[in-house]
Image (cartoon, coloured by chain):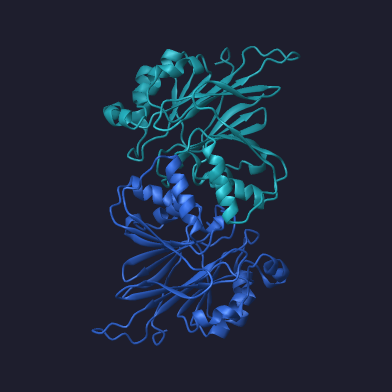
Chain colours: A blue, B cyan
Amino acid sequence: MIFSVTILGSNSAIPTLQRNPSAHLLNANERLFLIDCAEGTQLQLRRYKIHFQRIKHVLISHLHGDHFYGLIGFLTSLHLLGRKDELHLYADEELRKIIDLQLAVSRTRLVYPLIFHPLIPNRKELIIDSERLQVYSFPLVHSIPTNGFIFIEKHLSTVRIRHPRSYAYCSDTAYSEEIIPYIQGADLLYHEATFLHEMSVSAHEKFHSTAYEAATIAAKAGVKKLLIGHFSARYDELQPLLDEAKSVFPHTELAEDGKKFDICHSDNT
Amino acid sequence: MIFSVTILGSNSAIPTLQRNPSAHLLNANERLFLIDCAEGTQLQLRRYKIHFQRIKHVLISHLHGDHFYGLIGFLTSLHLLGRKDELHLYADEELRKIIDLQLAVSRTRLVYPLIFHPLIPNRKELIIDSERLQVYSFPLVHSIPTNGFIFIEKHLSTVRIRHPRSYAYCSDTAYSEEIIPYIQGADLLYHEATFLHEMSVSAHEKFHSTAYEAATIAAKAGVKKLLIGHFSARYDELQPLLDEAKSVFPHTELAEDGKKFDICHSDNT
């Protein structure tokens, strides 16, 4: 069964020609989940040849622009392309107002059902429970209400899975050991690493993490592998961020735009 | 004195990897005006090396997404980059609500003054009157209230200008001879040409124009030169649109992404 993540954006805050802001695509057994949707995400989907209409679920971690300003354009393009299938959107309740207002001013009535699922920001919650997969939201520590997500394979009664694989997405968040129980033992953890640790004061003020801190969380949570991303535009070169994280947690990789990561069964890796 | 237009997006509706949706940049004597701001416009500004902070005025023709979904990201980036100067925004009153709601959910208070100027959609109006330039808005014929704009050099008392140059921007609009008085004799007319004339029924239903119709307006208005743009994503090749327009109005060019057009004094061309 396919279980992979494609990085559609790895920058924080401001889009650059080298790195788009946050968006990930999870493929779980050919079911596609879009996680965050910064401005330009629909072009990134085209660039990496991911068919828009196959996406059935969109999860938005929080309402900072670099995580959702591309959503209304994506929803509108699905409409113009004649989508028929339901699209499920999981986000802060306020996002519904923003979408409704923008559709109203353009007198657009979507040709497909958009099903809105408001997220609860202050506790772990099961938000998707399908035959093969469960998805939970959980609180992160940021300047506005922000959710992380964890995607966990389900045991099937007919097929024996040796180990249910999992992918945890933590963006944006200050360093907080309170998130460890939610991501404990994940096969792949994405944790934001906006800054090098020499910028830790600035990171804390902005409720962001350093590469050192992301790696510390990965180590303490006993995850199998760490991806770092959400890089400040100040960093043209990302190797120092990777080196810093690896000094604490060697099994780390950079979540660079266009990279695809297959999540393996841990007894295979 | 510089008087030029740079095309930041030439597609209609859906962004593609080849063509971004609508945005133009007018440079009038080193004063920069951004006209429409589709998703991805801030990246186009980076791509064509136009310094964000030099833009002092943004004009939005109407509230279809392919003309303004990039605005909130552009405004937020100016904020994050520490802008201090005023930014003047001219648009339908409803846009203010959309911006305010998106800033509120992210708890953002812009660090620069954003001055909103609501446009009146049903008559010609002088919206900017500076020492060297006048800008008028005027009504187009579209499915929602839509404004065209015309930028006209002013005669100076100290410097004799042979002919005050002008740039008219008409997007989106059905074919309508009612717009001719607003754009009469313009040195450069941008007029949307979403379709080939073989699609004229579809064009009329959607309140868009064909290349043949754009050229007919250019001819009847006696403009010096025509730019066509806002091309349907169905057209990979634009030459047939250009050929169709030229058959009616020979002095036509394609408004392709990244192209810059210097607007010359008509007695020089």
B243 w.r.t. A212: above or below: above
Name the spot of residue B133 as percent of width and height, x first: 65, 22
Q: Residue at x 60, y 71 (%)?
A: A141
Q: Residue at x 41, y 38 (%)?
A: B12
- Quarter of the figure with residue A126: bottom left
Relative horizontal placement of residue A210, taking residue A5 as reference (left or right):
right
Relative horizontal placement of residue B176, taking residue A169 as reference (left or right):
left
B149 w.r.t. B220: above or below: below
Name the spot of residue B113 as percent of width and height, x first: 69, 42
Q: Residue at x 64, y 47 (%)?
A: B78
Name the spot of residue A184 as percent of width and height, x first: 50, 83
Quarter of the picture containing the C terminus of chain B is top right
Quarter of the picture containing the N terminus of chain B is top right
Name the spot of residue A61 as percent of width and height, x first: 50, 64
User: Is residue B206 visible to the viewer in this orientation of the structure?
Assistant: yes
- Quarter of the figure with residue A56: bottom left
In the foreground, A252 or B192:
B192
